[in-house]
Image (cartoon, helix red, strand yellow):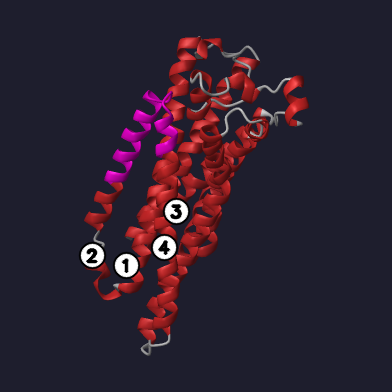
Amino acid sequence: MLEDKDMNDTSYHNLMMKHLEHNPLMYSLDNITNVSLGDQNITECAQVMIPHEVFLTLGLISLVENILVVLAIIKNRNLHSPMYYFICCLAVSDMLVSVSNVVETMFMLLTEHGLLVVTPHMMKHLDNVIDIMICSSVVSSLSFLSTIAADRYITIFYALRYHSIMTTQRAVTVIVIIWLASTISSTLFIVYYTDNAVIVCLVTFFCITLVFTAVLYLHMFVLAHVHSRRIIAFNKSRRQATSMKGAITLTILLGVFIICWGPFFLHLILILTCPKSPYCTCFFSHFNLFLILIICNSLIDPLIYAYRSQELRKTLKELVLCSWCF
């Protein structure tokens, strides 16, 4: 159990690490996070160690960026549309990763320096909360990426009916359902973390949402290219160009998500397929790098929002300037 875990261990707790620690069919936590000299001779891999300060710095920067994005969308009425509501929720999902990282790193730093005494029972509860936040983040992020893809699809191919199809009320309903489903499923995943079915569900959900989103984007870009040749009216052409710009933005977001979260999900797949292979153990030893990539995803997303949206970029500048004034 977590009571047996060293409080100064530099690896970060999460759902999959607990799975490895408790499941007798898998490697123990120590076999993955602390590679011995004997293991190094077999796999020729040593655990990648990353200072707590790096996690803390990236987490704080990401947290500030995503808070600014949320505030900008709330402040600017021109951004009060379903797509930006979904982007706002995507930023909140990124904030869950940032907050969980900052909280856990602060606890570990304070504990290391003897400034805070944390009992194993308290650490266990904190670990469960952090795991739920991280799991909710990945489930909600995938859900909102798919939702935004569907929103862009409707914008392009049902432009004249868009406002009647994607009303504010329906957008809010979708947002509430996604957050409820993410929270409930994440809680269940933590409760049943010792079951292989948890990893299977996460990997399956990851693959299904990626295929769904990829199919929508492929259909959008192929048909939009054909339709663009038939558009004559300037206003309609402009609407089409704006919609495609939104689709391109979300394509970039999806690509960054796959790059940053891909190694983590590959980690999960290897846990199921080859937990005792030396090569897989070598891959497991890079887990801290996978965590850094996940945090980088939360850090990069706001930069993509700002780069691709002039209106959002303008509002972000105003918020930053106002904060400096005070």
Q: Residue drawn at (67%, 22%), measured in percent from left and top?
A: 34
Assign the magenta stretch its main secondary structure. helix
x%, y% of residue 165? 23, 65
Q: Are marks 1 and 4 in contact (CB under 8 Å)?
A: no
Which callout, 3 or 2, points at the residue further toward the start of the chain?
2
Magenta stretch bounds: 176-201
Kind of residue at disc 2: Ile
Magenta includes 192? yes
Residue beneath label 4, please?
A: 215
Q: Which residue is mark 3?
A: 210
The first of marks 4 and 3 along the sequence is: 3
Q: Give the mark toward the camera: 3 or 2.
A: 3
Q: Earlier in the sequence, mark 1 or mark 3?
A: 1
Please give the name of the residue rendered at 47% of the width and 22% of the height, measured from the top-left corner. 127
Residue 165 disc label: 2
| Sequence-first disc among 1 and 2 | 1
